Image: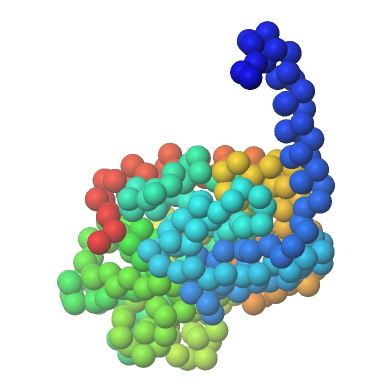
Amino acid sequence: MTPSRREFLRLAPAVAAVHAFSGAALAQDYPSRPVTLVAPYAAGGSADILPRLIAEHMRATLGTPVIIENVTGAAGSIGTGRVARAAPDGYTFGLGNWSTHVANGVVYRLAYDVRTDFEPIAQIVSSPLMIATSKKTPPNNLGELLVWLKVNPGKVSQGTNGPGSIMHLAGVLLQKETGVRFNFVPYRGSAPAVQDLLSGQIDVYIGLPADVIAQARAGNIKIHAIAARDRMAMAPDFPTTDEAGLPGFHVSAWFGFWAPKGTSPDIIQKLSAAIRAALADPGVRERLQQELYLEISRPEMQTPDALRKLQADEIEKWWPIIRAAKIQAE
């Protein structure tokens, strides 16, 4: 029998209370089984090692395994789509960054909205990019590199982590500010791009310090500058772009964690607390800073609200630039 409107209004508060109690009970029992952390990039690169370090610490805090699932392709949009489609029960969340949750929103025709289909959990780290070349290339510093690019228009190749990745946009910005022209070669992640840089299959890669510093110090590639105002405390031997002759060319990547839209706030807070505990651990901090050359976000930036604001600010800044450059996935 269909209830009357009066009966419905009388029962509505009780129904709402039952739903609230059920949600709270689920959050209280969470997690009762392994949690999946989607890494949208290839295994082996810094964007894969980063979530593994944090997931290992989260295992102890949450009392359950946190399993890494690499879902690669399309500048991270395939893995990010995997998170968007997951059940909002806290058992799937994903690593995201400037590319997946800012640039991809205009570069790709996505089946999800980067602004509304996710719940932010925590911002974790950031890192300025480095301009590197194959050791087979003639230039030995940034000034020589810019001259070499100008006298070889359209003959030089730059590897990227896919159309719209921050590595790609860094190259677009370099062309815009210097007038040079070169070709972009997309990869599924930093590991295969750096491998081709080592072999000389590509000439240039603008990437994260963790992916290029060790190879440069081993003499396998050349690093010409870091795209930042200040030298890195963990790698002070590399000059900034300001020092090397390209003032104002500053490009930095940042990383955070997101859950599917509709995930309970209580579960978000449990995940966020576990992530903050990992970032506060001295052992994790040392590895993030010394091995991956990442700058750990300040505690006040490690919150869902701070990540939401960062994403909104970055969208407002970068979407007009990307649209003006007419960057679209092929």
Q: Residue furthest top?
A: 6
Q: 292 or 275: which is nearer to us?
A: 275
**Residue at 71% from the left image edge and 65% from the top image edge:** 34
Q: 200 or 152: which is nearer to us?
A: 200
Q: Is residue 125 above or below residue 158?
A: above
Image spot of residue 33 (x, y percent) = 74, 62
- Could you tell whether 126 is left or right of 81 in the image? right
Q: 281 or 206: which is nearer to us?
A: 281
- Could you tell whether 268 is left or right of 152 in the image? right
**Residue at 78% from the left image edge and 72% from the top image edge:** 283
Which quarter of the image is occupied by the N terminus?
top right
**Residue at 66% from the left image edge and 57% from the top image edge:** 91
Q: How is the image coloured?
A: rainbow
Q: Quadrant of residue 158?
A: bottom left
Q: Residue furthest front?
A: 1
Q: Is residue 118 above or below residue 208?
A: above
Which quarter of the image is occupied by the C terminus?
bottom left
Q: Is residue 308 above or below residue 110?
A: above
Image spot of residue 324 (x, y percent) = 26, 46
Q: Is residue 231 visible?
A: no
Q: 229 or 203: which is nearer to us?
A: 203
Number of marks in the rendered image: 0
- Could you tell whether 213 is left or right of 141 in the image? right
Image spot of residue 216 (x, y percent) = 49, 85
Q: Quadrant of residue 66?
A: bottom right
- Could you tell whether 145 is left or right of 66 in the image? left
Q: Is residue 330 visible?
A: yes
Image spot of residue 103 (x, y percent) = 40, 52
